[in-house]
Image: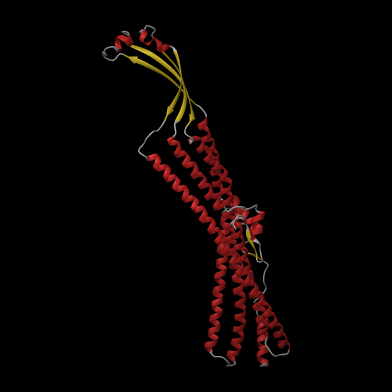
Amino acid sequence: MVKLITNLFVVLLLSKYSFAFETNQKISGGGALIDLHGLIELVLIDSYDLKKGELDLQILRQNVKRQLSEFYPRVDLRIGANNIKKFGSIPGIDSVLLQGKDDINTSEATVALSLNLYRGGYNINSYRAALLEQKFGPISIEKMRFNVAREVLQLYHNLKISILNRKKSTLELNVEKNYLAMQEIVFNEGQITKVELSQQKDKVDELKRKESYFTYEAQSYNNILLGLIGRDEKALSKKISVKLINEKYVEVFKILNFNIVENYDLLGMEQKYKLSKFDIEKIKSKYLPKIDLSSLYVYSAFSDKSVTSAFNDLEKDKSLIGITLSWNIFEGFATNKDYKIAKYKSRKLKLDILNKKRNLINEKIEIELNINKFKDEIDSLQGQILQVQHGMVISQEEFNNGQTDRFTLDSYKSKIKILEVEIKIKFDKLNLLKVDLFGLGQGVS
């Protein structure tokens, strides 16, 4: 037995496998370090979705000005010149207009001014709808910012979990490799069968594959994140620094100036509901009279002064001011049906809002339950660490008294490190859920 313990001690001393747990993990190659905060900032700067959102905001602003233009008068200018030629013999035209001549030149200038005094409320409701859309524009962009940042965080979280799982696999692999070394010594002394030794080798091989998988997975997430900040030389020169500690992601979002008072999706639905009210009013305007003011100034002249007096008045300046009243009395019930359809759609949107509020409350409850579940699991793991630490103290005493071997003592140490990794994984999942809770908005209750 003493010989066996001595041999195991020598094997463990020669082993090059480390149980060290790094505080920070650098995944990519050389270059400037970039943490989560910097990573999100860079992605937000280069996000095509946000750039398109800014253009959408400019479109909304121009649309407000477009709707406002309906309240301004319209001025049209038309200038014309004609040449009337004799073509055959047309009774009346030749004698009255041409006066026996082969042709005659005419000119005309018209200036028209029109103004919509009243369109049944259509223009004012269109303008108000445009103002509402413009007001929601910045909120829509803020929603895009949050979604982009949340996507980056999810990838960063996946990268971090992959690194932690790889570390856990490495720790487990080291334990099993050391146990395999002990098994090989025991096998050589004929105390176990070849089948038992083979089973331990299979376990080691499986953990090697697991470790390789998590290494590949971590590198994949790393490449995806680097791709989000661009494919140029400057972007590729950066490397992501993953903090293998308890990162409070909500604080990162607050530093990035995210302050979600009301749920973005709910605000968008409420905007659609308000717009539906304007749609109803615009359809109602078809029932109401329209009043237009028009003013017309015309100057016409003939080149030949000998034109008959029947056309002499055409040479004079003429002006006209008039008010027109139009009213769509009946068009086969189409407007009535459009009005009812618009009202039904508006009611549906109201029900969607109520349903969304209910779903948000349920979602909040579910997130809080999962947060509490992770807290309980963390408490359980921390309790397991205390138990293992207690066992390690006993094992240390037994080892000092020659009552146990080095492998048993080191197994306790490895178990503590593995449990610490599992706690880090649970904490990171918990912190990710807190961001989702943060994203629901403060108004959800």
Residue 401: which quarter of the image?
A: bottom right
- Residue at the top extreme, as displayed: 306
Residue 176: which quarter of the image?
A: bottom right
Residue 105 at x, y percent in the picture: 38, 13
Q: Nearer the viewer, residue 161 or 73?
A: 73
In which quadrant is the N terminus drawn? Answer: bottom right
Q: Nearer the viewer, residue 231 or 384?
A: 384
Residue under the image location 66 percent in, 84 percent down: 408
Tell whether 342 sits left or right of 367. left
Q: How many callouts does the rendering have? A: 0
Residue under the image location 59 percent in, 74 percent down: 169
Residue 108 at x, y percent in the picture: 42, 17
In which quadrant is the C terminus drawn? Answer: bottom right
Q: Nearer the viewer, residue 167 or 193?
A: 167
Camera sees residue 28: no
Residue under the image location 49 percent in, 53 percent down: 352
- Compared to residue 105, the image places residue 394 above or below, namely below
- Compared to residue 301, the image places residue 274 above or below, namely below
Tell whether 190 sits left or right of 22. left
Camera sees residue 192: yes
Residue 51 at x, y percent in the picture: 56, 47
- Compared to residue 307, the image places residue 342 above or below, namely below
**Colour convention:** secondary structure
Q: Nearer the viewer, residue 81 or 220?
A: 81
- Compared to residue 433, the image places residue 119 above or below, namely above
Residue 228 at x, y percent in the picture: 57, 55
